[in-house]
Amino acid sequence: MKFFVDTADVEAIAELHALGMVDGVTTNPSLIMKSGRDILEVTKEICEIVPGPVSAETVALDAEGMIAEGRKLAAIAPNITVKVPLTWDGLKACKVLSGEGHMVNVTLCFSANQALLAAKAGATFISPFVGRLDDINLDGMDLIADIRTIYDNYDFKTQILAASIRTVNHVSQAAMIGADVMTAPPEVIRKLAQHPLTDKGLEAFLKDWEKTGQKIL
């Protein structure tokens, strides 16, 4: 499974990338606002850190506007993935931009039918929002499983990018189902290394080591 980090925090991206934990980055208008920086400037900087796909989102609501914005964003760097919403106009923009050779991430997917349309429109990535489905008492992982089945049935090349990942369980569950990619905030990725039994075991080892009176250095 590929790991994308869902943030516009350049320092966090650089730290995780240095550890080999980042295959790509996803951003959105909310994350850009949180960074307090110009979208073109911060996106360019992210692309210089991470060689993998960097999603930059359009904000227009009509296909013509999305296409124009997508072309401007794609000009920032070769690894830009233009992010468009899963609306009819977004699908139109996806078809045009993917036809021009740009990577496209179709976002805000909440149904298998939407994912099917995105694949047929040439999407590079489809982003089902797991956490937001959980918020309304639906199982987001069921959607990941449904999309996986449909894409495998017809050999669609669109990659399933599990988004709105909020817990470490979301990550492992998406991996077991077969999501190609997951994107999560830096804090969720860091929590993947944590387990109370690891902490307990380490504490016991250190107590025993102290009793030996030995030193390694």
Image: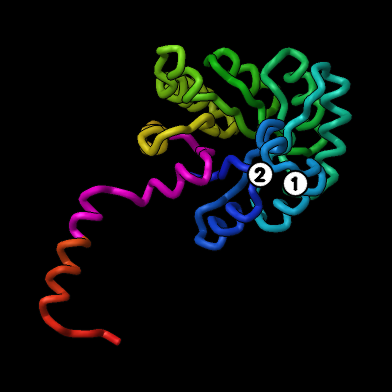
Please indicate whether residue 42 sits to the left or right of residue 149 in the image.
right
Identify the residue shown where x is 24% and y is 54%.
198
Secondary structure of residue under mark 1 = helix
Instruction: Please state which of residues 29 and 122 is positioned toward the viewer in this rendering.
Output: 29
Residue at 46% across, 19% down: 143
Instruction: Locate residue 89 relative to residue 7 in the image: left or right.
Output: right
Looking at the picture, tell me which residue is in the foreground, 77 or 188: 188
Is 184 included in the stretch rendered in magenta? yes
Q: Is residue 43 left or right of residue 142?
A: right
Q: Quadrant of residue 11?
A: bottom right
Does 111 appear above or below 51? above
**For residue 34: magenta?**
no
Q: Which mark is residue 8?
A: 2
From the viewer's perspective, tell me whether residue 62 is left or right of residue 154.
right
Q: Report the residue at 82% width, 33% height from top.
A: 70
Residue 215, image x and y in percent?
Answer: 23, 85
Q: With respect to residue 20, does 133 lie above or below?
A: above
Number of numbered markers: 2
Q: Quadrant of residue 115?
A: top right
Q: Position of residue 12 (x, y in %)?
A: 58, 53
- Looking at numbered disc 1 in the image, what kind of residue is underneath it? Thr
Q: Position of residue 95 (x, y in %)?
A: 77, 24
Question: Which class describes the residues within 10 Å of circle 2: few (<14), some (14-19), or many (20+)?
Answer: many
* Residue range of the region highlighted in magenta in the rendering: 178-201
- Neighbour class for label 1 at 10 Å: few (<14), some, many (≥20)? many
For mark 2, give the secondary structure: loop
Nearest-to-viewer mark from 1 and 2: 2
Would you say the residues marked 1 and 2 are in contact, meaning their CB atoms lie under 8 Å apart? Answer: yes
Residue sitting at 68 percent across and 39 percent down?
55
Q: Position of residue 117 (x, y in %)?
A: 64, 17
- Report which residue position mark 1 lands on: 43
